[in-house]
Amino acid sequence: MKLKVLFVTAELDPLIKVGGLGDVSGGLPCALRAQGHDVRVLLPGYGGLRGVSLDDLPIAVRLPTPGHCMRELVEDEDHPPVWLLDTPEFREREHPYQKRDGSGWNNDAEVYAHLARVAAWLAGDAAGLDWRADVVHANEWHTALVPVELLLRRVPVASVFTIHNLAYQGIFPLTTAQRLGFPNWLLQPAALEFHGGVSFMKGGIIFADHVTAVSPGYAEEICTPEFGERLDGLLRSRRTALTGVLNGIDTARWNPATDDSLQYRYSIDDMEGKRAAKRALLDELGLPANTNDALLVFVGRLVGQKGIDLLIGALPELLKQPVRIAVLGSGDRLLEAALRATAARHPERFAVHIGYNEALSRRFFAGGDILLMPSRFEPCGLTQMYAMRYGCLPVAHAVGGLRDSITDASASRANKNNSTGFLFRNATVDALLEAITRALGIRRSKKRWMTMVRTAMREDFGWEASAQRYVSVYGRARSEREIFSEDTAGRPVS
Ligand code: ADP
């Protein structure tokens, strides 16, 4: 059955992307559409949308509040239509979550609660657009109030809520929620109340018909106190309505054979370009052009989650070995400073580029031999999938989506021919070093290494399979809510 899906998100690559949420929102709706489903994406009309001038877009519908409207970015061959919620508060935002000075906005609760309200209004076609959703798919805390609004407005549309990262929950003072006009029953511990404030994330977990997390591993982990961010009890209580679905990647946009950011391109059948890409990257980073030594790369946000402190802890030992290390990232100012200081002390071996630069990240994956991903927790992780596609083998902490997407080289003999990386179990410097040593050991056998590289490049991380899993989740959400469609004369639709 073909479904009408309203996909609600705070980020959408390539219009606006801060992290993995942007990639997922850019990929999944297109994959659903390719499978014949009728998808609409709802996104805030931020002032900072790339390549879009809001004023040039047609108004699909005006909202009751003066100055508020919904603009439509019409579909093209591959992309479903995007509805942009145009309000002065969103227009003001160059970046979804930060002001120019790096501080957060103080009206997050208001603007994202408003987005959820508008989503419910659109889903039931109260807007009169002649389009009514079968399922609303909300993502992350910003849109976690969508299932709540569907309930409050009695919109009989099934809802799915996806947790991309439980560490960000949208927690606000109780008084803010009262000001937003939520009924008192909703501000109780059985609903949104959370340690004296309110948690938007709780709204999605409790009131969505089905909850997903972005990998099967993470879906399990968040039900434990270690990874549950104080919501593990609630998540355990919803275990039967919680499914892990591994994210996909856009394999057309991330392809070393056609990547415009690369001077030298390559494919599984012709790997010469990868060696050239490594030389070019070393040159770009100002590191000596020695392609025999392994080039270890890190790409990601420089925050505690990514285990960058483990990497920094491992550096003294690592820098004694015949390797080069390059880091691309931005985030915590102290971590940035520590990395810059290391680069200044070891200019021949260590390079760091502070900033967000997608083209450069592609050259890191193409030029790198090994990706370091010592994340303390990793809901899914896309970086390791991009790296594997570019033949850069991950050394990663065995958590969440990392353990679901990487086959460890030495887990057992059975993995000998299908291994794609190196996993370590404990988040310690020693365990990281041990896994890197293991990787460097295997790299000494060119044949074994190239077999792994080709296996990793061949892995199918495309969106197709994930989109199919989401469609079955949508089916479960619909039957959990017992939606009755007109054309089946009152029989439940599964
Ligand atoms: P998260 O969503 O936790 O940041 P993911 O691995 O799921 O981590 O996705 C991060 C995305 O952002 C990947 O596409 C990664 O390559 C990209 N990325 C992160 N930091 C940078 C950076 N400094 N420059 C370029 N791309 C980056």
Image (cartoon, grey):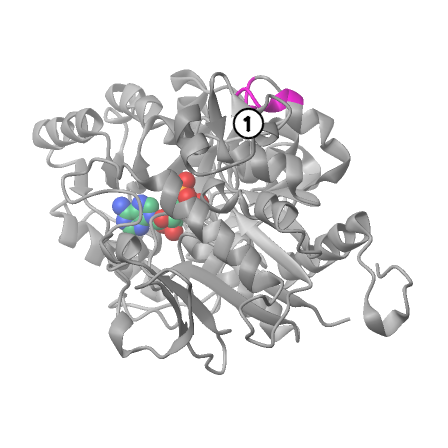
Measured along the vertical axis of the image, is residue 148 above or below residue 270?
Answer: above
Measured along the vertical axis of the image, is residue 232 above or below residue 269?
Answer: above
Q: Is residue 491 left or right of residue 226?
A: right
Crowd rating for badge 1 (residues with CA inside 10 Å; few <14, some 14–19, many 20+) = some
Q: Which residue is mark 1?
A: 187
Q: Is residue 83 left or right of residue 287?
A: right
Label 1 residue near ligand 1, CB within 8 Å? no
Q: Secondary structure at mark 1?
A: helix
Measured along the vertical axis of the image, is residue 195 above or below residue 132?
Answer: above
Q: How many marks?
A: 1
Q: Residue at x 15, y 48 (%)?
A: 285
Q: Amino acid at mark 1?
A: Leu
- Residue 414 location, quadrant: top right
Q: Residue at x 32, y 59 (%)?
A: 87
Q: What are the residue bounds of the magenta stretch?
A: 226-233
Q: Is residue 482 magenta?
A: no
Residue 433 image offset from top left, x and y in percent = 39, 23
Q: Residue at x 59, y 62 (%)?
A: 123
Q: Residue at x 45, y 36 (%)?
A: 395
Residue 68 image offset from top left, x and y in percent = 35, 63
Residue 210 image offset from top left, x and y in percent = 69, 44
Quarter of the picture containing the N terminus is bottom right
Give whichever of 128, 294 is nearer the camera. Answer: 128
Q: Determine if residue 251 is in view.
A: yes
